[in-house]
Image: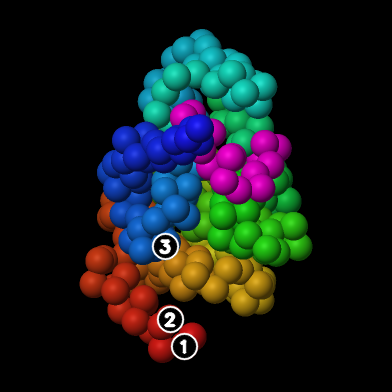
């Protein structure tokens, strides 16, 4: 009697997820698309889940609709945890990822808590509160990816993954100050404004002065410190993943350089890393390794 045929990998589901990352994050796609195929597809599935979670909140300004979307997604995650996932490409791809890797459901729930924090948004009072927020919306992503990129050592590398996620989120915040303000969100901690040298009106006026640069650099320095803390653990990641994880970190860190080169204009200019610069970073990392 012949054995049952193996269930084919859900190629179409992964392609759906790949198209999402290609559309929304050229930097992540550049960094991870050259991973071994199975790992790259797992990264795409996780990115697609995170994008789905993010869009459930950010694609509407109607708070009641945001709460409804969030509740639907939370319920879908509960179903997934029970093995009763919704018949949708993202959930089907994630099921395949959970079958192939030693995944933990906790960061997925924590990610949704981060989205909930955006629904009930309050300006963080301190850097500690800002970093807590960064854990929920981005440190969790590092934890989701860790079992894929460090298959043998992921249990011992959790703090490194969180360092990288938080560093990247702080970078996002520094890049998007103007856009966030237009969406009624100020992620710069209140303590920076309480000193009296830079005010909410200055922010509304998109004022870039010495005090603004000092505030920006204070957060950027913390972001760069977190990148450095992450780098210390890179050799414990899988050999076939180290280059790609490093590249993602260096590309994101380079956004800070782009903002500086644009005179700290986070209000009107689009600060990004060009494809040419990404390729230069990749060659530099290859030589270093």
Q: Position of residue 73 (x, y in %)?
A: 54, 21
Tell me the number on the disc at residue 35.
3
Q: Are marks 1 and 3 in contact (CB under 8 Å)?
A: no
Tell me the number on the disc at residue 285.
2
Decide which of 119, 28 is in the foreground and name it.
28
Can the viewer see residue 137? no
Can the viewer see residue 160? yes
Q: Position of residue 283 (x, y in %)?
A: 34, 82
Horizontally, is 109 left or right of 62 in the view? right
Decide which of 180, 22 is in the foreground and name it.
22
Q: Residue at x 59, y 40 (%)?
A: 98
Horizontally, is 155 left or right of 169 in the view? right
Look at the numbered disc 2 and give the secondary structure of its residue. Answer: helix
| Start-end of magenta stretch | 91-107
Position of 10 relative to 174 (above/below): above
Q: Residue at x 47, y 12 (%)?
A: 65
Asked if residue 39 is among those painted magenta in the image, a careful observer would answer: no
Decide which of 134, 75 is in the foreground and name it.
75
Mark 3, other Cα within 10 Å: few <14 / some 14–19 / many ≥20: some
Q: Residue at x 26, y 66 (%)?
A: 274
Asked where in the image residue 263 lies, by quadrant, the reply is bottom left
Look at the numbered disc 1 and give the secondary structure of its residue. Answer: helix
- Judged by depth in the image, the label closer to the viewer, 3 or 2, is 3
Instruction: From the image, tell me which residue sits under label 1.
Output: 288
Tell me the number on the disc at residue 257.
none
């Amino acid at each position: 009697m012949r054995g049952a045929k193996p269930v084919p990998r859900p190629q179409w589901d992964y392609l759906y997820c790949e198209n999402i990352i290609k559309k929304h994050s050229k930097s992540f796609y550049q960094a991870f698309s050259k991973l071994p195929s199975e790992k790259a597809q797992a990264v795409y599935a996780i990115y697609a889940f995170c994008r789905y979670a993010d869009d459930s909140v950010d694609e509407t300004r109607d708070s009641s609709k945001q709460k409804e979307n969030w509740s639907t997604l939370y319920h879908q995650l509960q179903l997934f945890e029970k093995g009763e996932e919704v018949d949708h490409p993202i959930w089907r791809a994630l099921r395949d990822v959970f079958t192939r890797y030693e995944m933990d459901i906790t960061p997925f729930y924590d990610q949704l808590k981060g989205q909930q924090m955006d629904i009930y948004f309050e300006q963080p009072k301190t850097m500690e509160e800002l970093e807590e927020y960064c854990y929920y919306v981005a440190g969790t992503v590092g934890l989701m990816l860790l079992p894929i990129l460090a298959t043998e050592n992921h249990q011992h590398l959790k703090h490194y993954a969180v360092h990288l996620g938080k560093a990247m989120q702080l970078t996002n915040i520094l890049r998007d100050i103007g856009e966030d303000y237009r969406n009624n969100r100020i992620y710069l901690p209140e303590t920076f404004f309480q000193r009296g040298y830079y005010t909410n009106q200055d922010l509304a006026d998109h004022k870039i002065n010495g005090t603004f640069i000092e505030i920006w650099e204070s957060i950027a320095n913390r972001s760069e410190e977190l990148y450095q803390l992450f780098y210390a653990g890179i050799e414990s990641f899988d050999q076939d993943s180290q280059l790609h994880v490093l590249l993602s970190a260096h590309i994101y860190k380079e956004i800070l350089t782009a903002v500086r080169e644009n005179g700290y204009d986070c209000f009107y200019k689009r600060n990004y890393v060009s494809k040419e610069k990404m390729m230069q970073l990749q060659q530099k990392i290859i030589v270093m390794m």
